Image (cartoon, coloured by chain):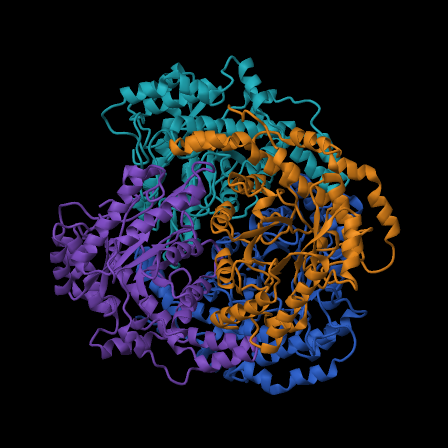
Chain colours: A cyan, B purple, C blue, D orange
Amino acid sequence: MTTAAVQDISALADFGIEVPSWAYGNSGTRFKVFTTPGVPRTPFEKVADAAEVNRVTGAAPRVSLHIPWDKVDDFSSLASFAADHKVALGAVNSNVFQDDDYKLGSLTNADKRIRAKAVAHHLECIDVMRATGSKTLKLWLPDGTNYAGQDSIRARQDRLAESLQEIYAGLDADHTLLIEYKFFEPFFYHTDIPDWGTSLLHCLALGDQAKVVLDTGHHAPGTNIEFIVAQLIRQNKLGAFDFNSRNYADDDLIVGAADPFQLFRIMHEIVSVGAHLPTSGINFMLDQCHNIEPKIPGQIRSIMNVQEATAKALLVDASALEKAQIDGDILGAHAVLMDAYNTDVRGLLADLRESQGLDRDPVAAFARSGYMERVETDRVGGQQAGWGA
Amino acid sequence: MTTAAVQDISALADFGIEVPSWAYGNSGTRFKVFTTPGVPRTPFEKVADAAEVNRVTGAAPRVSLHIPWDKVDDFSSLASFAADHKVALGAVNSNVFQDDDYKLGSLTNADKRIRAKAVAHHLECIDVMRATGSKTLKLWLPDGTNYAGQDSIRARQDRLAESLQEIYAGLDADHTLLIEYKFFEPFFYHTDIPDWGTSLLHCLALGDQAKVVLDTGHHAPGTNIEFIVAQLIRQNKLGAFDFNSRNYADDDLIVGAADPFQLFRIMHEIVSVGAHLPTSGINFMLDQCHNIEPKIPGQIRSIMNVQEATAKALLVDASALEKAQIDGDILGAHAVLMDAYNTDVRGLLADLRESQGLDRDPVAAFARSGYMERVETDRVGGQQAGWGA
Amino acid sequence: MTTAAVQDISALADFGIEVPSWAYGNSGTRFKVFTTPGVPRTPFEKVADAAEVNRVTGAAPRVSLHIPWDKVDDFSSLASFAADHKVALGAVNSNVFQDDDYKLGSLTNADKRIRAKAVAHHLECIDVMRATGSKTLKLWLPDGTNYAGQDSIRARQDRLAESLQEIYAGLDADHTLLIEYKFFEPFFYHTDIPDWGTSLLHCLALGDQAKVVLDTGHHAPGTNIEFIVAQLIRQNKLGAFDFNSRNYADDDLIVGAADPFQLFRIMHEIVSVGAHLPTSGINFMLDQCHNIEPKIPGQIRSIMNVQEATAKALLVDASALEKAQIDGDILGAHAVLMDAYNTDVRGLLADLRESQGLDRDPVAAFARSGYMERVETDRVGGQQAGWGA
Amino acid sequence: MTTAAVQDISALADFGIEVPSWAYGNSGTRFKVFTTPGVPRTPFEKVADAAEVNRVTGAAPRVSLHIPWDKVDDFSSLASFAADHKVALGAVNSNVFQDDDYKLGSLTNADKRIRAKAVAHHLECIDVMRATGSKTLKLWLPDGTNYAGQDSIRARQDRLAESLQEIYAGLDADHTLLIEYKFFEPFFYHTDIPDWGTSLLHCLALGDQAKVVLDTGHHAPGTNIEFIVAQLIRQNKLGAFDFNSRNYADDDLIVGAADPFQLFRIMHEIVSVGAHLPTSGINFMLDQCHNIEPKIPGQIRSIMNVQEATAKALLVDASALEKAQIDGDILGAHAVLMDAYNTDVRGLLADLRESQGLDRDPVAAFARSGYMERVETDRVGGQQAGWGA
């Protein structure tokens, strides 16, 4: 067995993962949303929780917002609050799935008034970006239909293209529009942006400021996701990741929990072209729910899982790999990759944290901190945050 | 092209399909539950809506209840109300997914107290059966886990077997326990009854009063459902169907909307052994949601789709089919089946309805009736029924 | 129930479907290739069989060739033979999967010599096109890997782009290059053109003469194929169909056998924008195997299935559909589509055939013709054609 | 992060994995079988190759045979040859998929003569067992159909049950009949034993000597295989594993190559009930092809992958896991499992090998041995073994 000569994972010191504000609120299935004590009631409390994840991992420097869930009267005060807690506000996520008007679609709706409303919501999100300093607008389009014939697939694409043009026109020059695709849900016959090809076509039509966001849970069974990563990077159109795990649907589990080898293969495609470096401009984000497990520890574990996969990818002996590939040495090339994957990087990562002045074990550090007990006591009364608010 | 010599679908006159009370209430996805005017607020109003489906189709003689959603102070008055509306109360469905106690499982929970509570709920459902005259208890077990290692798969099977024994012991001699399986959801790593094999093993361990219920939406991609139907009938263990359509997950769409040919193949397995006759004891039920389409018309369409598939199955020329099969005439045998499927049976069904004193077109009859407008006016105030109530 | 006022399927008189020469040869699985008497031994005999399909259906005017399987000394004599049999030679299909050199890839191979060889094969195919008068080169790229790390996904895309440029440069001005995608097989970890997005990106990079070919069996489970059809037409990049049926993998069954409703939905997207008309330039082809059923009747059935699906699509009441869609009448719009699908069009098609001077029933006409018995007697000795020859 | 206090993997010293004779012969896809120098031409040469795998790993003590591919005039001399090479002959695998008679089925065929022939083949295999000393007959039933209606699903189950009774009656008292299930292929509409439920039902009908064999590649997408393992063990009906990897279909790749975490979860279910011990009677076998990679090294890697997964499973801190599970500590329980999985066990396994007098690195040991060069030189002429012989 060979091992990488040098185990250098120092690039991870600058590798930040953005966390979603909604991970700290309640979430669930259509069957039940379980609640737990201590869940945030306001965007400020969500940011505080996210800051705790960053405090113990040193790797979660930004928090994504979701509008309207994270609407506040004064976004600059939210940004200051975040800065005080040593995190920044990140991407702004729009929401066109919770208004009764959007039952038959938002940016694709046959009704011009509703399309205009959905466009206006995005322009409002751009205003939030200006207020928070965020440079990224993320658009997951939930539109689709449940029955064959319900609406014209073709007409909806045309309407979508037009709506996107209007949103794109509202961006500032340093803004990026991220367009997310999803295989299915919340509609079950067809989805208006179901795959990376559709997302990319709209981005190409819009221009350089539009890029694709790849949610690891949004693909058909058996899809080779690392292939899509490689393809989008090759087109210079990979704008961001939404990391989570999927076994069946868009299960939104802790990233790396379902298939840690897949996460490693994805990070290998990233690392092999240097796309893990800040200069790549790719935004590595979590997008997941913690339906039953504690939310802050769930986020910490997720951050650590991405770090472990990335560390392993950094350990791949690139020149040995390339040599075996060029030589057509199938098992040899595979073995180079597996050697990195099979390495236990937990100690290396603990060392890295220690060198950064962090606790070697973020999970234990958080448990010891008393934070959870404190918020469980403090956050009594009010309305816990969830997907509806 | 050959056609069946005699187009006799008269067996459909006695073919009743049970409808679910919850189809008339609000439903949706984890993202949004859309509401519409006129939705029932009480079990009585649900039964009234169901009765309307039966009035225009003549084929929906029973209504399944869901406990606690359909809990009333006096079940005998609900049964009388139903009888007055010319329908009967059907299967009683238990619910072990909406109590906070069930976050980690109900009949499989590691906590003995919670298992006892879940068992007690089923005994309460059996009391409801005694009050309503229902003979059928339907148990869909939502239990499962989200993460590998979260609980012991094996221990949960053992606990489940024990819990089921206690429920089974509470049945009257003329009661049937239907055990439903489901591939995934609301948990996403493992499900405690994920497939027909598991459901059947528990039924075999319990005894003759336990049978399997097959929900057409609860299988892995690519599963040949008609094979399972044939196998369960062969074991004399097919207790019931939950009909709906699935494209991706447990999408709960109108049955026959996603794949009408599959529905036909299923009904062909049923008809080819006479299992469509009342004597078979199989309960043909709808289990579906109408998230965005009108609910009563959605149910009417579903009833009609099952009727059309069954009518086509009745038109299969059984002796020609068997001859071609025995002769190894692949295309000939396939053609016999397809000839029945390709026949337009809508006129035959309209004739049958007319012969039963019904309108030839149930959809139009309902639209004309003014029922919807009436309930939209009447049902103002109160809390619309949904999955939570 | 509503029915389309006018049942006009006359457009089908000009709707031709190209048949593959390899459908008439032996085929099978990795486990076994079953043989039957009468299978063609030469390209001439394949063309004769294909001509028989056209004779009885009047709808199969062209035969696709596969090089080297259909290599002959003198292609112009093959073209004359075809013309004498009232069919034309159609698309030329390349083959880069049966040479030992291609074990690790052809156009993507790390070895420059092998890439050049694969390019040269395509240039040879273009020469065949010049000899036969075909205007279409169809490229299915079988390249891929079996193990993570085996080769660089990214480097292979770059090599592929370069190889395709060389092939494209060899086309005449009136030639079209069709690029096919496939989810998996014959490699099982990654495929170099796995999806429509990848195929389209390469076509866009090449130019107007490159278009995508959609094989109905080459998608992940659950993929909404009619969406892809609509999207590719919207981009003016749908070059051709390879029709067949898929239940599990690339099963290559008779088109319409697995899911006739899906075939109808696909043809609805085609018909709704007039893409069924010859002016669209879309090549509607069969690509399927007849592993166990008789091959010529299997092709006849396939042609008829496409015709039936197209006839139903022609019966869709487009204005009623659009009105219901614009009105947001979910069930109404769905019903308009289903009314067309549920119509029995077999009589209409028989009438159309009769009006064309054909037998009303192509299957019976072929059976009666004695052709099969004749070739079973005549084609004795020699080597039956198959995938290897 | 916690780590298991004691890293005891000594149980692996007695953990043997049976290898398939056919892994050493040629294999491929329906598109192409690539050949390589040195491939065995006889069952003796296959056994010699298998013995080499055992020599370097110390963990492959038996070789499965496949009849008729491994038919020899004198099976006792083959058994002696094996013994001389320090391996034993293992399970005997029947083959009912390569005779023209089996086109429409073998044990399920509508033709009584063909069923009798297929039964007789199994009785012949039992005779081979008597000659070789094998105690295990493995039956993978390839039967199925390609088209709806082609044959009666129900009638085929009845015929199958009858055929299996005849085979079972031919077993000696110390023989085991293993019945394998498979989701699809080589037929593509229905398979006669498609899932574990069907296999188990037939085993239950037969008696104690019949058990289920689980091939890790034979499931629908998304199937939780470790659940099935747990369920079959609970029924005392898990007879054997066929290990391999699957990404899409029955891809037959090196076990652990596609999803090493899944392999670990499977071995965790095994280890957690002690089923890895020889007393369990479960036969752990490889069943895979090496289409493009070198075959002996491919087998060595497979053995090592199973060992690594099992070693990790042995490192799971069972009492910590159970405590966290009982406490409902979701993330804690998951973490206990992941701690074992994330451990690098390659050093431990190398130590174990050294303690057994083996080379620490079996791959390197084999490469150094010169065996491959020797057989490439020696095995010239004759017919290389493959699936057809």
Q: Is residue D73 left or right of residue C205?
A: right
Task: Give the residue furthest to the front.
Answer: D173
Residue D71 left/right relative to C346: right
- Residue B265 placement: quadrant: bottom left
Q: Quadrant of residue B308?
A: bottom left
Q: Residue B299, how many percent across, how many down?
A: 27, 61
Q: Is residue A109 above or below residue C91?
A: above
Residue in the foreground of this view, choosing between C317 and C279: C317
Q: Position of residue A168 (x, y in %)?
A: 44, 36
The quadrant in which the N terminus of chain A is found is top right
**Corner quadrant of residue D332:** top left
**Front-most of residues A330 and D209:** D209
Quarter of the image that includes the C terminus of chain A: top left
Residue B218, x across and y down, in percent: 40, 54
Question: What residue lies at 42% left-to-right and 34% top-to-bottom?
Answer: A288
Q: Residue at x 76, y 60 (%)?
A: D75
Q: Residue at x 67, y 64 (%)?
A: D125
So how many labels did they put on this image?
0
Residue nearest the observer in this picture, D357 or C81: D357
Q: Position of residue D330 (x, y in %)?
A: 41, 32
Whether C77 is drawn above or below D63: the answer is below
Residue C72, above or below B246 = below
Residue C304 relative to residue B52: left or right: right
Residue A282 shows in this picture: no
Q: In this view of the protein, can residue B250 be seen by the observer?
A: yes
